[in-house]
Amino acid sequence: MHPATVIVSKALPAIALGLRHSIRDTAGEDIPFMLIIFTPEVLSYYSTAPHDVSVPALRHFFECVDSNNEKITQEQRDAFKPSHARAVSIMLPAVKSMADTLKFISGEDLALALFFFTNVRASYVANGSRDECFPVIRALLEDMANGMPDIPAHHIAMH
């Protein structure tokens, strides 16, 4: 296995836990999220959202991407609270910082994507291009939708 993949798999729970606390401090509440790290061999992710939340939200996210946001309803716009917008905007530098940290510990430039989930939509920040990240995330989404186990060890408790 590639050394960066091993390092990321070992560091991911601690990174995600720190991220969870940063999000809570920033937004004033827990916002379910999925952190995806594109390592040389595999996609590594950590999620606080179970598949029954993340799969529909990611599906809708890609429908909106594919339709140039024409599929966002007023309900979905209203569900995106100011605390979520603040968390998304503040977490952009955090993604850069996480990428810098991962480069330091792994010796590799790694792309990251961070999705936030509300009850009706997903928003994201990333340091990788859409062309680089989206095909891999779509493949993960299809695996999740087609029965990939929703393993509790992949999640951080939201208490």
Image (spheres, rainbow, N blue to C red):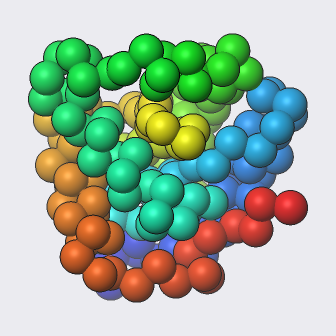
Residue 111 pos. (x, y %)? 36, 44
* Residue drawn at (73%, 21%) of the image: 83
Q: How many marks?
A: 0
- Image quadrant containing the C terminus: bottom right
Image position of 93 (left or right of 69): right
* Residue drawn at (52%, 83%) of the image: 151
Image position of 102 (left or right of 16): left
For the question of whether residue 35 can be seen, the reply is yes
Is 73 in front, or is 94?
Answer: 73
Residue 110 pos. (x, y %)? 38, 48
Above or below, 101 relative to 39: above
Residue 155 pos. (x, y %)? 62, 70
Is 104 in front, or is 53?
Answer: 53
Quadrant in the picture for residue 119:
top right
Is 22 in front, or is 150?
Answer: 150
Quadrant in the picture for residue 55:
bottom left
- Image quadrant containing the N terminus: bottom left
Image position of 74 (left or right of 1): right
Is 35 in front, or is 128?
Answer: 35
For the question of whether residue 104 can be seen, the reply is no
Above or below, 93 relative to 39: above
Residue 70 pos. (x, y %)? 21, 16
* Residue drawn at (28%, 47%) of the image: 59
* Residue drawn at (27%, 63%) of the image: 140
